[in-house]
């Protein structure tokens, strides 16, 4: 008997239809054909999705648990997403709300190369981590390097490219990364904080591989990825090919009907995100406190064989909110303040230093 | 002055907040930082998203049009999606409903290698096309080849792998494809209909490239792709690298808050889908007639420099519905009946022939 993934769906339905709707998901996410027309015993026993339970949540919502055969994933990242939610993502009123993975899936995908501990070690930190983003796109490599230097002089831990900074003519990846890396390294030598610069990988797998080579030759060991844009397979391939690299995941284009805690917390972690960025409550996005708590929990909770992934609440955060965010998430966190820090203009170094002090003072 | 993409969003809002919410999207999808803190004239003029119009649709919904600088896409598929909807996909109550692409974007991506005309030529058809899918996953290569042969003997145009059939141990791609291709070729020689078998590409870019090589050496010239699983960049790369190949796009994992007509119709076509599969109204999915009409329109409408892409309504279609579907979509269509055809069991060849006759009789 092969192992099974427990997939959990939240389904809008009336009481009369829920049983059929639930069985429909089990079929859709496995054999996708009339069960009566299946003749193979093997397919019926080992491939067909199995409806485990239906729970009435009230208000016309049900929680449906389905056991999906791990073998159907081929232990490949894109196919894993296909089996969890491929066609069902197109159905109205159904959210993929959680998944529980058996050991063979966990060991096949393996989780973060470095995780929380590794990201702390890189910057010799013990508690919460501080991060910001280089913006706006349209800036030249020299402008971005100047900004990165001013921020690094404030003693921050991580500086990432804005996820919109890709490989545009006004700032080609190959021209931008070495000069920003050098500017940050110089500033880090000055402050004593080993600030890391994270370029945003983009394009197809060939392009991203070449970008990682360039990052390494520029002395970098941590990068930003956007798994929903690059493709989950490409992300997982890069993670596996580059055990020295740490990967921070950006949620861009991730607005599927998949619970954010599953997608950005559990799934990105399983595939190898060392840290995962998500929209914090109270910012520009509509995420609730509960949702953010669940994301952080999925990223961090004890998971044998999988390193913890650093939750990175972001999206319209400000210096004033630092104590509140730390109170909410605790010390296993990376705080990411982008645009608000940039509003400091010429005082960016001082503002960055204030941000870092606020985070480190909290410990 | 660089060109601009017109991106159209449907936004839930009250009258008081809509202006700020609309400006927020323009910022989020371009510079993603406080505009007041931007000093560069170039960024303000040539990179910052420009709010073009806000239209009250009634019922608390607004249509917001924003002009996004084409240069920010770097003319790369993943980054195109990032700029259209990256972070905004995470915002509650906002749908990306349409996009209008300027000439430089169109010529950079180029659309289908073959399109409607090419897919008709491959099977010497003049009107609507007939297709089905091999199922269920879990079947062995020999079982799938037997099924494919029986279907091909019915004279069908296209037979695709079920999108769940990937590279699993029970039916590895490299073992499955040559034997199915041979079985279909034999049956096609018998019927005189040049039936095409479409393997489902899966895995990362390396894997898919190797799969295309194998397809070509098995005499195949058309394949199935799932752009939302493979990544848009990987799909577009394959399209560009293989001008002899036709690509049929599957919508799996596409349940974003992006209008299906834009994603499966316009965007997949722009990136090169020769045909695009989508859930027809009245099947297992909740798509409306209007939505399906819009998808077909986006796939087919006159678009200088971009071949028409074949709309493929699917998802729980039956033989009985053929006349109605043809009446609805006209002759520029491929009809895809999967599971219902398989219910015919031993009569699959006859049932397939009936399906093809129904489609061809309609012309």
Image (cartoon, coloured by chain):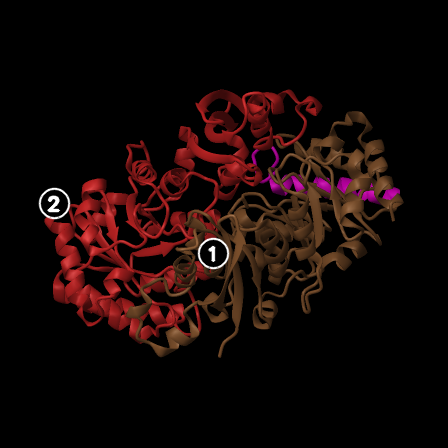
Chain colours: A red, B brown
User: Which residue is painted at 85% across and 32% down in the image?
Assistant: B350
The dot on residue A363 is 2
User: Which residue is painted at 51% across and 67% down in the image?
Assistant: B75
User: Eyeballing the image, is B47 above or below A120?
Assistant: below
- Magenta stretch prevailing secondary structure: helix
Residue A259 at least partly seen: yes
Residue A197 at least partly seen: no
In the rendered structure, the answer to whether residue B21 lies left or right of residue A29 reads left
Which chain is indicated by disc 2?
A
Span shown in magenta: B165-191
Return the x and y of residue A151 as percentages of the image width and height.
21, 65
Q: Which of the pair A327/B171 is nearer the observer?
A: A327
Return the x and y of residue A156 as percentages of the image width and height.
19, 59
Residue B189 on the magenta segment:
yes
Q: Residue furthest left?
A: A361
User: Which residue is painted at 58% across and 66% down in the image?
Assistant: B101
**Which residue is the site of mark 1?**
B85
Q: Assign a secondary structure to mark 2.
A: loop
């Amino acid at each position: 008997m092969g192992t099974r993934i427990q997939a959990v769906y939240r389904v809008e339905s009336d009481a009369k239809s829920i049983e059929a709707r639930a069985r429909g998901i089990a079929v859709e996410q496995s054999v996708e054909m009339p069960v009566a027309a299946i003749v193979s015993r093997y397919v019926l026993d080992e491939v067909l999705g199995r409806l485990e339970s239906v729970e009435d949540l009230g208000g016309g919502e049900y929680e449906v648990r389905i056991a999906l055969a791990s073998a159907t994933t081929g232990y490949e990242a894109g196919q894993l997403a296909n089996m969890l939610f491929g066609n069902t993502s197109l159905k109205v009123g159904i959210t993929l709300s959680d998944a529980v993975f058996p050991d063979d899936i966990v060991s096949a995908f393996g989780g973060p190369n470095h995780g929380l501990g590794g990201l702390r070690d890189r910057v010799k930190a013990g508690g919460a981590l501080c991060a910001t983003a280089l913006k706006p796109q349209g800036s030249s490599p020299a402008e971005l390097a100047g900004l990165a230097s001013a921020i690094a002089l404030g003693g921050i831990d991580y500086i990432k490219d804005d996820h919109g900074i890709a490989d545009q003519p006004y700032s080609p990846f190959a021209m931008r990364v070495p000069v920003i890396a050098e500017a940050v390294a110089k500033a880090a030598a000055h402050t004593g904080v080993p600030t890391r610069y994270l370029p945003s990988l983009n394009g197809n797998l060939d392009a991203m591989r070449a970008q990682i080579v360039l990052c390494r030759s520029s002395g970098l060991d941590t990068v930003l990825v956007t798994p929903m844009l690059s493709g989950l397979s490409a992300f997982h391939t890069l993670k596996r090919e580059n055990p020295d690299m740490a990967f921070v995941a950006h949620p861009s284009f991730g607005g599927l009907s998949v619970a954010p805690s599953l997608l950005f917390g559990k799934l990105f972690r399983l595939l190898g995100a060392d840290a995962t960025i998500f929209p914090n409550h109270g910012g520009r996005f509509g995420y609730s406190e509960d949702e953010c708590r669940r994301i952080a929990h999925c990223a961090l909770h004890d998971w044998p064989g999988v390193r913890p992934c650093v939750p990175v609440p972001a999206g319209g955060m400000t210096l004033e909110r630092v104590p509140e965010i730390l109170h909410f998430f605790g010390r296993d966190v990376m705080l990411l303040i982008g645009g608000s820090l940039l509003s400091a203009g010429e005082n960016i170094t001082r503002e960055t230093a204030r941000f870092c002090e606020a985070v480190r003072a909290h410990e």
